[in-house]
């Protein structure tokens, strides 16, 4: 059976918009390491941080949540 890969919307949107994790970290006031952990699904951002990320990426917060 194939391993199910968990997609990360933050990673997808950063790639789509040709933005770097460092840029996002600066926008939301977090370290690059923290943002890398969000992008790699090692940790999940708080609801407040999720809204900050959505604002920085100019997307609806719902767009960052996988169903």
Image (cartoon, helix red, strand yellow):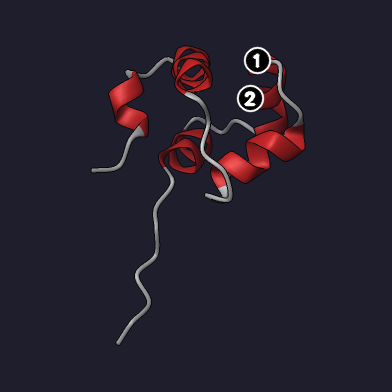
Residue 47: which numbered mark, if any? none
| Residue drawn at point x = 47 percent, y = 36 percent | 10
Residue at the farthest left position:
67
**Which residue position holds label 1?**
27
Could you say which quadrant of the image residue 61 lies in?
top left
Q: Residues within 10 Å of mark 2 (few under 14, many from 20)?
A: many
| Residue drawn at point x = 71 percent, y = 16 percent | 29
Q: Secondary structure at mark 2?
A: helix
Question: What percent of the width, then of the height, locates residue 60?
Answer: 32, 18
The N terminus appears in which quarter of the rendering?
bottom left
The answer to whether residue 33 is left or right of residue 38 is right
The C terminus appears in which quarter of the rendering?
top left
The answer to whether residue 44 is left or right of residue 62 is right
| Front in this rendered view, residue 66 or 21 | 66
Q: Residues within 10 Å of mark 1 (few under 14, many from 20)?
A: some
| Residue drawn at point x = 44 percent, y = 19 percent | 54
**Which residue position holds label 2?**
24
Q: Is residue 49 above or below residue 17?
A: above
The answer to whether residue 4 is left or right of residue 54 is left
Question: What percent of the width, then of the height, locates residue 9?
Answer: 41, 40
| Front in this rendered view, residue 24 or 35 | 35
The answer to whether residue 25 is left or right of residue 14 is right
Q: Given contact means CB atoms under 8 Å apart, are the residues at marks 1 and 2 in contact?
A: yes
Could you say which quadrant of the image residue 23 lies in?
top right
Question: What percent of the width, then of the height, locates residue 11?
Answer: 50, 42
Could you say which quadrant of the image residue 37 lies in?
top right
Question: What percent of the width, then of the height, locates residue 20?
Answer: 65, 34
- Give the spatial CA distance, label 1 vs label 2: 5 Å
Q: Is residue 57 above or below residue 14?
A: above
Q: Secondary structure at mark 1?
A: helix
Residue at the farthest bottom position:
1
| Residue drawn at point x = 57 percent, y = 40 percent | 38
């Amino acid at each position: 059976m194939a391993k199910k890969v968990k997609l990360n919307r933050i990673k997808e949107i950063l790639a789509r918009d040709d933005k770097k994790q460092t840029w996002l970290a600066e926008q939301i006031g977090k370290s690059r390491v923290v943002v890398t952990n969000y992008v790699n699904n090692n940790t999940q951002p708080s609801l407040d941080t999720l809204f900050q990320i959505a604002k920085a990426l100019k997307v609806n917060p719902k767009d960052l949540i996988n169903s």
